[in-house]
């Protein structure tokens, strides 16, 4: 009976024909079973289509037995040939589609979970990793049933007559499974904080590398860079001007000069590597010269390139990270396609190996710094404030009288410094005034917008008085014999933090005064943090026994 060859696959309402191929012609025919969708839901209509199809199958097999040409097997307007299979380009298109669909779907689910249930989202990280591992095991051991129908549907939507037993289809099912696993892996790496992770499987990377370049726009790199910066400025979370914008523009100018302002879509892996290798060998101090910053790329290489001691790993990471961001931004806007050529250059920074962190001042070094203190009283005073607060240089130099306030929380009056407009939300904070800074409170207050130390000039793109103060401190410490970059104004923050750890202050408490992010639980469930009395207790722990610290006068 014909109906024994007709079936419906789970989840499908349409009939399909499944006819075993006679053993004597299987080798010549190239398959053991012929599977063909009949494209209809009605059983009678499906039978009407199946009858002539089965007849043509037998005609093909008889032709093979007689050594005659094999007639085409037709069903309505469709044509199926025994050896037919999609082109490699079409297979790669299906792989790309599978990857992008899963990646988009997982991103939407993560975003919804993050918005609706933050605790559940955090708790779900491990569950997502477990699901990824299980899927990897299924693929490794050939359990691909769940991918058969999605693959068939994607192929059918592209005009491919699917034979579930054909070797090419079995291979395509596995490729779609790998693409799904890869997309979920990218999502998990985003969960772990990786910036712009890319697919890692050969199947997916080759599929995207082969994507046709049609539709990309030939925009000069300088034009693209300008558009990127406008977008970045419009979307940043704070209006506070920082060095970040200046650094990004410097990187884009460097690469634009190297690439001769050609469109980003033409950048290859070799181009990115050549740029990185050349820039790596620049004199570390090349950007300190205003004249040097104005030179074209060829002159920069001539004057500053080829040095035995080049740029640090941290500096190179920053440059290549900017270019990764630009590529990702441009790709979303149809200005380039394929794998990001600026990936793979990141170097892990290991303190003491390829990065030299700031180091706290030793007691004898503090004595040398303060005896005698700087001739400029304003510089002496910001140094002392840093020693008793752990504040950053620009935070101190930018203080106005309107940010020297007092709190009556808990029944105690506590004067404090208010830090606002920090780069991060955690950086905005209240820092009690230490008793040894009482001389500052006894001064005549200026207007709210008047800076406590107006003698520092506002310099740089962000008009930061800390820039001028930093130059003065660098000259002062160098005159005292401190030339290492590990000993800087920022080292005072290290001294204060060392005092806190040795006094047993909980890290979560100190972070609220220091300006760093707190742990998730306290940050979410107690956003107000510790009270002012506790803050004052912590600041009161700061002392420097055996060190004569100047006490400025009113």
Image: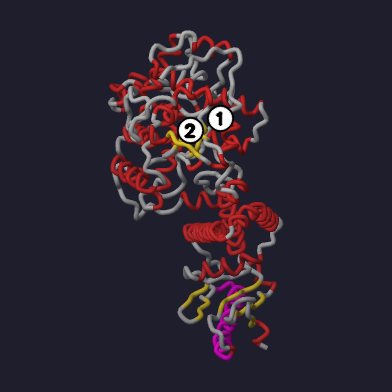
Q: Position of residue 110 (x, y in %)?
A: 56, 57
Quadrant where the C terminus sits is top left
Residue 86 sits above or below residue 454 on the image: below
Q: Position of residue 544 (x, y in %)?
A: 58, 18
Q: Position of residue 435 (x, y in %)?
A: 53, 25
Indicate whether residue 69 is drawn in magenta: no
Residue 259 sits above or below residue 170 on the image: above
Relative to residue 459, is residue 337 drawn left or right?
right
Q: Residue at 63%, 48% (x, y): give it.
A: 521
- In the image, the segment drawn in magenta is 44-68
Q: Are marks 2 and 1 in contact (CB under 8 Å)?
A: yes
Foreground pick, 27 / 49: 49
Regarding residue 98, the answer to whether it shows in the image is no
Task: Give the mark nearer the N terminus: 2 vs 1.
Answer: 2
Quick one: label 1, few (<14), some, or many (20+) residues within 10 Å? some
- Residue with the most extreme bottom position: 44
Q: Position of residue 31 (x, y in %)?
A: 63, 68
SS at mark 2?
helix
Indicate whether residue 59 is drawn in magenta: yes
Question: Would you name the residue on which mark 2 appears?
Answer: 317
In terms of image quadrants, where is residue 464?
top left
Question: Would you name the residue on which mark 1 appears?
Answer: 349
Quadrant where the N terminus sits is bottom right
Residue 85 sits above or below residue 199 on the image: below
Relative to residue 323, is residue 45 drawn left or right?
right
SS at mark 1?
loop
Report, in whole angstroms, how far the alpha carbon at label 2 lies from the one at label 1: 9 Å
Q: Main secondary structure of the magenta part?
A: helix
């Amino acid at each position: 009976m014909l109906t024994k060859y007709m079936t419906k696959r789970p989840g499908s309402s349409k009939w399909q024909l499944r006819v075993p191929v006679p053993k004597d012609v299987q080798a010549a025919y190239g398959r053991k079973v012929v599977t063909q969708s009949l494209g209809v839901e009605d059983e009678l209509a499906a039978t009407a289509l199946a009858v002539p199809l089965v007849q043509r199958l037998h005609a093909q097999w008889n032709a093979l037995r007689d050594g005659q040409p094999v007639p085409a097997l037709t069903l309505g307007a469709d044509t199926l040939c025994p050896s037919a299979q999609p082109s490699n380009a079409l297979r790669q298109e299906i792989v790309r589609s599978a990857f992008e669909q899963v990646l988009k779907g997982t991103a939407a689910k993560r975003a919804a979970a993050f918005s609706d249930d933050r605790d559940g989202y955090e708790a779900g990280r491990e569950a997502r990793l477990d699901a990824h591992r299980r899927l990897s095991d299924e693929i490794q051991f050939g359990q691909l049933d769940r991918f058969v129908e999605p693959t068939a549907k994607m192929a059918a939507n592209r005009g491919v007559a699917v034979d579930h037993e054909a070797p090419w289809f079995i291979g395509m099912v596995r490729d779609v499974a790998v693409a799904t696993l890869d997309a979920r892996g990218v999502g998990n790496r985003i969960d772990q904080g990786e910036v712009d992770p890319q697919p890692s499987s050969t199947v997916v990377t080759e599929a995207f590398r082969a994507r046709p370049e049609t539709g990309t726009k030939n925009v000069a790199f300088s034009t693209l860079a300008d558009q990127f910066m406008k977008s970045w400025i419009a979307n940043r979370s704070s209006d506070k001007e920082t060095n970040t914008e200046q650094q990004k523009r410097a990187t884009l100018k460097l690469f634009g000069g190297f690439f001769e302002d050609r469109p980003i879509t033409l950048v290859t892996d070799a181009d990115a590597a050549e740029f990185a290798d050349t820039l790596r060998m620049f004199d570390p101090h090349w950007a300190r010269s205003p004249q040097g910053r104005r030179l074209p790329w060829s002159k920069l290489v001539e004057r500053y390139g080829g040095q035995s001691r080049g740029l640090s790993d941290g500096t190179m990471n920053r440059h290549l990270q900017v270019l990764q961001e630009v590529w990702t931004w441009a790709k979303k806007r149809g200005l380039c396609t394929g794998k990001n050529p600026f990936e793979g250059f990141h170097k892990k920074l290991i303190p003491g190996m390829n990065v030299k962190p700031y180091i706290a001042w030793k007691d004898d070094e503090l004595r040398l710094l303060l005896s005698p203190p700087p001739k400029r009283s304003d510089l002496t005073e910001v140094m002392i404030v840093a020693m008793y607060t752990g504040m950053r240089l620009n935070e101190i130099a930018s203080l106005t009288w309107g940010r020297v306030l007092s709190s009556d929380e808990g029944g105690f009056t506590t004067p404090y410094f208010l830090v606002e407009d920090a780069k991060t939300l955690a950086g905005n904070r209240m820092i009690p005034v230490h008793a040894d800074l009482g001389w500052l409170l006894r001064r005549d207050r200026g207007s709210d917008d008047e800076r406590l130390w107006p003698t520092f000039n506002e310099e740089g793109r962000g008009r930061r008085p800390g820039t001028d103060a930093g130059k003065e401190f660098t000259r002062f410490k160098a005159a005292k014999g401190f030339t290492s970059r590990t000993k800087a104004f920022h080292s005072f923050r290290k001294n204060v933090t060392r005092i806190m750890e040795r006094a047993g202050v909980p890290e979560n408490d100190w972070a609220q005064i220091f300006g760093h992010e707190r742990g998730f639980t306290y940050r979410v469930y107690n956003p107000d943090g510790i009270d002012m009395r506790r803050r004052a207790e912590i600041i009161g722990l700061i002392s420097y026994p055996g060190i004569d610290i100047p006490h400025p006068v009113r």
